[in-house]
């Protein structure tokens, strides 16, 4: 069962919406099914007793900013049994901006080729992006949560940039854009 989880509780509750045309895959068995208008899909050709990972393929009918709130699970199918899985889908956030440096004489200039890293609240790097020639960066499909943006130590040193303090950003379930 695949649904748009609007409140982030990872359960289908009033206000959430089933997602039609999402692809569910049994990876090791190379089997797929498409969700119906009720968000349900059935995988019929699973080999009994052979472990497989079940995932929702985010590249299927997803809107550009949707991210899965459930990474999937390994199952061992048994003849005559049904395993019910829920895949909550969240609206991912977006963040963009321009990395600039102070020249020391009151002017600022864009910083090209600077790697910026996005860390989650546990301190794990979850995404990276490098600025373009104009210093522009863009992160998309950021799962809901709290994150910190930091210039990568090595590229900051190479670009002769002093890293500013950590900046905290929060992304909600409505698809926050910063």
Image (cartoon, rainbow, N blue to C red):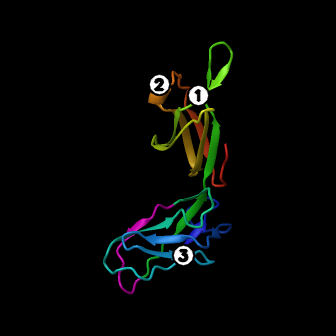
Callout 1 touching callout 2 (CB < 8 Å): no
Above or below, comparing residue 81 to residue 118 in the picture: below
Q: Quadrant of the C terminus?
A: top right
- Near mark 3 (Cα within 10 A), the count class, few <14, some 14-19 or many ≥20, is some
Task: Compute the Cα span from label 1 to label 2.
Answer: 11 Å
Task: Report the front residue among 36 and 84.
Answer: 36
Name the residue rendered at 60%, 33% in the picture: 133
Residue 19 figure quarter:
bottom right
Residue 82 x %, y %: 43, 81
Tell me, yes or no, whether the highlighted magenta stretch contains residue 36.
Answer: no
Main secondary-structure element of the magenta-colored stretch: loop
Position in image of residue 58 (x %, y %):
53, 62
Give the spatial CA distance, label 3 vs label 2.
Answer: 48 Å
| Secondary element type, mark 1 | loop
- In the rendered image, residue 83, in percent from the top left (x then y), is placed at 44, 77
The mark that comes first in sequence, 3 or 1, is 3
- For disc 1, the marked residue is 111
Mark carried by residue 34: 3
Q: Residue furthest top?
A: 105
Between disc 3 and disc 2, whose residue precedes? 3
Q: Earlier in the sequence, mark 1 or mark 2?
A: 1
**Residue 158 bears which disc, if any?**
2
Q: Crowdedness of circle 2 by 10 Å Cα count: few (<14), some, many (20+)?
A: few
Start and end of the magenta stretch?
70-81
Mark whose residue sits in front, 3 or 1: 1
Q: Secondary structure at mark 3?
A: strand
């Amino acid at each position: 069962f695949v649904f748009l989880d609007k409140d982030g509780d990872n359960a289908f509750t009033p206000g959430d919406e089933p997602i039609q045309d999402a692809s569910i895959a049994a990876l090791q068995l190379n089997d797929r099914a498409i969700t119906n208008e009720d968000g349900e899909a059935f995988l019929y050709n699973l080999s009994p007793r052979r472990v497989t990972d079940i995932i929702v393929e985010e590249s299927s009918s997803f809107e550009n900013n949707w991210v899965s709130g459930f990474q999937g699970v390994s199952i061992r199918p048994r003849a005559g049994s049904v395993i019910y899985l829920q895949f909550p889908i969240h609206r991912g956030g977006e963040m963009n901006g321009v990395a600039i440096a102070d020249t020391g004489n009151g002017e600022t200039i864009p910083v090209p080729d600077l790697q910026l890293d996005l860390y989650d609240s546990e301190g794990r790097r979850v995404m990276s992006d490098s600025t373009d020639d104009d210093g522009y960066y863009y992160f998309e499909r950021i799962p809901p949560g709290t994150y910190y943006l930091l210039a990568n130590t090595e590229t900051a040193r190479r670009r002769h940039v002093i890293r500013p303090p950590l900046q905290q950003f929060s992304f909600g379930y409505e698809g926050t854009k910063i």
